[in-house]
Amino acid sequence: MLPIPPGGDRRAALKARHRRAIIDAAAALIDETGVATFTVDELAVRADVSRRTVFNHFASIDEIVTTVCSEVLGGVLDEFTATPTAATGDMFDEVVEVLRATDLVPPMAYLTRVIGMEDPVASTRQAVMLLSTFTDISERLSEELTRRHPRTELLDIHLMVSALFGGLVVLHRYWFEATGAAVDDESRRVWSELLERLIAATRNGHRSTDTPS
């Protein structure tokens, strides 16, 4: 049997275990129904913790759902951390290649269903949850880029990541309108085309395409 960590270490380990149990329970409940419709009491029972413990870790059900969705979308970050630094040292190219190589359609479809973006009239709450999910991933990506490129100004890293991941939020709307959040080859083609437009706009800047009359 492993020794029990002393004092603060024990409390920290218990806190981390409870948080993990809550997130795993939420993911399991979502998988069972396909949507995030569980109550705090249902979640507490599934996680084998008290209602109070749930709120000690998360401010709301929405925050828990956002955390679950962030972990699903986190495949992008996993791909990135597993990819060696580009020989050119260009952090933009590093991120772009991972975005191109990662199949984002399944996690985007998951987010759409779980958050409830399939509703024709998505609420402000749903939009905030979607944005929060992407913000969480972008912050973690910024931390990884800072580690890889310590000589690059933090502002430059945040601006680049915000431009790309803020753009992904915009792409989600156009992709959903075109595909209904389907997970198939056509949906992947649409996503790929939209992604290339985002990459080009972020790399080259945004210029008006209006022609003089």
Image (cartoon, grey):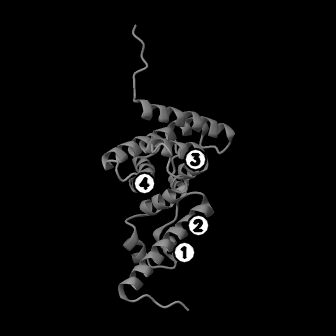
Query: N-terminal of the two: label 3 or label 1?
Result: 1
In the image, farthest residue toward the top: 213
Which picture quadrant has residue 146?
bottom left
Distance from the alpha carbon under mark 2 to that under mark 4: 35 Å
Secondary structure at badge 3 equals loop
Residue 189 is situated, as x and y percent measured from the top left of the image, at: 63, 36
Picture layout, residue 41 above or below residue 27? below
Which quadrant is the N terminus positioned in?
bottom right
Distance from the alpha carbon under mark 3 to that under mark 2: 21 Å
Task: Count neighbours of disc 2 (C-alpha within 10 A) and say few if under 14, some if 14 to 19, many if 20 or more.
Answer: some
Question: Do the CB atoms of the residues marked 4 and 1 lie less than 8 Å apart?
Answer: no
In the image, farthest residue toward the right: 185
Query: N-terminal of the two: label 4 or label 1?
Result: 1
Secondary structure at badge 2 equals helix
Residue indicated by mark 1: 46
Q: Nearer the viewer, mark 4 or mark 3?
A: 4
Question: Do the CB atoms of the residues marked 1 and 2 lie less than 8 Å apart?
Answer: yes
Query: N-terminal of the two: label 1 or label 2?
Result: 2
Secondary structure at badge 1 equals helix
Residue at the (39%, 10%) spot, across then down: 212
In this rendering, position of residue 143 left or right of residue 194: left
Residue indicated by mark 2: 28
Residue indicated by mark 4: 148
Picture layout, residue 60 above or below residue 50? above
* Amino acid on which disc 4 is placed: Arg
Residue at the (51%, 32%) spot, across then down: 197
* Amino acid on which disc 1 is placed: Arg
* Amino acid on which disc 2 is placed: Ala
